[in-house]
Image: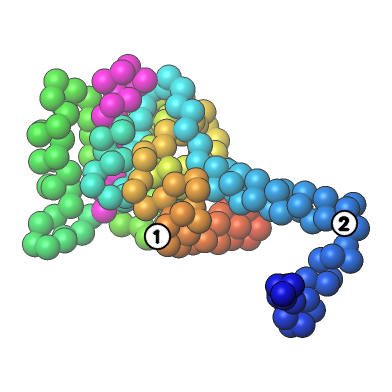
Amino acid sequence: MIPRVPSFEPRLLSRLSPLMRLSKRKLIIIACIGCISGLTAVEAGRFLVVDDPERSDVIVVLFGGLDDIREEQGLMLLRKGYAQDLILDVPDWTLYGQKEPEAAQNFLRTFAGDQVGHVHVCKFVSDSTRRELLEISNCVSSLAPAAHSAIIVTSNYHTRRALEIARRLLPQYHWSAAAAPDPQFKVNWWARSEYAKTFVTEWQKLLWWALIERWTVR
């Protein structure tokens, strides 16, 4: 008895038929578009990160991030001789019963070691990177009046936008950036939900700065 060859379901054939009708050239084009889209996604995450610190007069550490990563990155650069002074930016508010400037001073006494005399705390009251940098400029002028160059230290995903804002607002300084490895973000932003959330939020802020806010700077 001849075995019966199973036939494809009509519904499955109807799904496959459009693909079967595609020419080899069209399939290659579709594959290329998919590859380009994937590469674009990778580059979009990598574009947010700028990590190329240059030897400068002062290091400026922006407030934020998790687990003191920004502060640790700034202190590492200071120990390696990237600058003579470090300015640690902290908000002038109280959190969990402790004032942030006092907490920053305690952190520095614990971790700065023999560099503690070269680290300074700068208070700010702003709620945006733009206003924060404007307040920091007063600290730089006061603590390092001869400074002409500065390294901005912030979380990896924030470096592109922070660097662009600093160069636009404070062109009297030559700026470079150092990226602190924040656990909330990696360039393969699609790998985890928190990476994707940070990616989308930061791109929204970067586009708002590039398209709207930067043109209001005089």
**145, 166: nearer the viewer:** 166
Q: Give coordinates of residue 203: x percent, y percent.
A: 55, 57
Q: Is residue 173 above or below residue 134?
A: above
Residue type for callout 1 = Glu
Observer-side mark, 2 or 1, equals: 2
Q: Which residue is mark 1?
A: 194
For the rendered model, the colour scheme is: rainbow
The residue lying furthest to the front in this view is 1
- Residue at 70 percent across and 48 percent down: it is 35
Residues at circles 2 and 1 in contact by the CB criterion of under 8 Å? no
- Residue at 77 percent across and 82 percent down: it is 10
The residue lying furthest to the top in this view is 81
Q: Which mark is residue 26?
A: 2
Q: Which residues are magenta?
A: 75-91
Q: Is residue 82 above or below residue 10?
A: above
Q: Give coordinates of residue 45: x percent, y percent.
A: 54, 48
